Amino acid sequence: MPELPEVETIKTAIERSIGCCRIRSAEIRNGHLRLPVPGNLPAKIKGAGITGYRRIAKYIVLELDNGTSLIMHMGMSGKIRLLDAYPNPPEKHDHVILETENGCIVYNDARRFGLIVCCNTANLPENPLLKKIGKDPFDDQLTPTYLHDKFRHKKIPVKQALLDQEIIAGIGNIYASEILFGAGVSPLRPAGQISSGECGKIIEQTRKVLQKAIAAGGSTLRDYKKPDGSLGYFQYQHCVYGKNGQKCPGCTCNADKTGGIKKIVQAGRSTFYCPQKQK
């Protein structure tokens, strides 16, 4: 599933390519996504002007001048293609095609776990998809005090708590492992045992890791591609994720004796960490 850096990359690419212009038409070729694409979506957005682009957690929001916002989520395998003209012919999994004055936005999703819906812009904060979302990693309100307060009564492992979108929005499995490595915190520790100082390190590393990943265009491990069809390359900068048995960056121990980076499964998700550096 695309995580925050990938979604930010997609949002920025759409904004730079399409910009603020009018939507000429919208075609629903297959509305059977995770949530059904509203049948009235073409009528609600046709002729409207795009006035702004936002990323909220892992959602992309296009704000329109008619008081409507278009909300998109990539799900597990969704991707955006940006074309100069209507695709001829469309690809098999091109489910929604938006034709604008500056080109086409094509939503393609092989597994159909993503979504495209619309709502009144004024009601965005109360939309069920967005209402319970936690602090954005780059929000000034994400402080050590805030995070420590959210963690302090939790018995679940800190790695699992980092994936809770109601605490911090946008962190997924890949980046949780990288963040905890950078902070020197073991993913096995209960969230309630993480000190305020360690929460500060986690926040610092969250911003550092995500900024580096955004600059690299995200991580391509399976389905993710940037809207221009190219791959992200942050996977080549991963410190621990996917590196089971290898030395971690700056390692001074003997990986042949220690076993190097460990891989475990937590709540059904793979976790990678260095037991020597993360306590």
Image: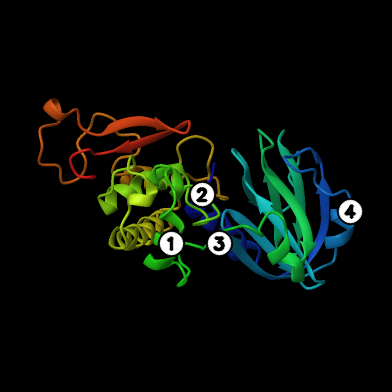
Question: What crowding class fits label 2: few (fewer than 14 Cα within 10 Å), some (14-19), or many (20 or more)?
Answer: some
Q: Nearer the viewer, mark 2 or mark 3?
A: 2
The residue beneath circle 4 is 40
Residue 171 locus on image (x, y percent) = 47, 51
Q: Is residue 100 above or below residue 154?
A: below
The residue beneath circle 1 is 149
Give the farthest residue toward the front.
153
Which residue corresponds to the image point at 51% horizontal and 49% vertical from the top-left? 164
**Kind of residue indicated by mark 3:** Thr
Number of the label disc, if any, that sits on residue 273? none
Quarter holding the C terminus? Answer: top left
Q: Are marks 2 and 3 in contact (CB under 8 Å)?
A: no
**Kind of residue indicated by mark 1:** Asp
Question: What crowding class fits label 4: few (fewer than 14 Cα within 10 Å), some (14-19), or many (20 or more)?
Answer: few
The residue beneath circle 3 is 12
> Which residue is at the front of the view, 166 or 190?
190
Q: Nearer the viewer, mark 2 or mark 4?
A: 2
Which residue corresponds to the image point at 83% horizontal and 57% vertical from the top-left? 25
Distance (Cα) linking label 2 and label 4: 33 Å
**Kind of residue indicated by mark 4:** Asn
